[in-house]
Amino acid sequence: MKRLDLDDLPPKTALLLQGLEPGEELLLVQHGAVVGRLTAAGAQARPVEPEVSPEQHAREVFEHFRSSVEDEF
């Protein structure tokens, strides 16, 4: 797969590409002839991990440590 860094493009072109909606097409034209067609894909959402309080995190770390020690002996 080829890669194009938007930072390497002129600002107007980069904004045009960033503004495409998922499924929207962009024609690439040179001297009046269509030389390519891009279809925008939707960004993949990362799964959101639930917020854990520092106290809860400390309890989980301690429990994991205690469990590891018990498994060793």
Image (spheres, rainbow, N blue to C red):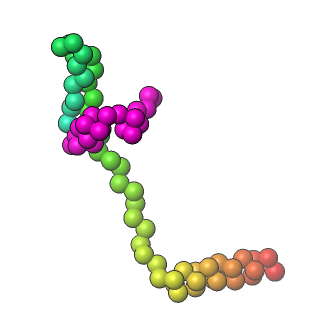
Question: In the rendering, at what x and y percent does residue 67 appear?
Answer: 69, 80
Left-right relation of 69 to 27 = right
Looking at this view, is 29 or 23 the one in front? Answer: 29
Question: In the rendering, at what x and y percent does residue 3 appear?
Answer: 43, 32
Q: Quadrant of residue 12?
A: top left
Asked if one can make out residue 40 in the rendered structure from this viewpoint, the answer is: no
Question: In the rendering, at what x and y percent does residue 50 appear?
Answer: 41, 72
Q: Quadrant of residue 27?
A: top left
In this picture, which residue range is highlighted in magenta? Answer: 1-21
Up-down relation of residue 3 to residue 61 (above or below): above
Left-right relation of 20 to 4 = left
Q: Residue at x 35, y 54 (%)?
A: 45
Q: Is residue 4 part of the magenta span, yes or no?
A: yes
Left-right relation of 62 to 57 = right
Up-down relation of residue 57 to residue 43 (above or below): below
* Farthest right residue in view: 73
Q: Residue at x 33, y 47 (%)?
A: 43
Q: Is residue 34 part of the magenta span, yes or no?
A: no
Asked if one can make out residue 38 in the rendered structure from this viewpoint, the answer is: yes
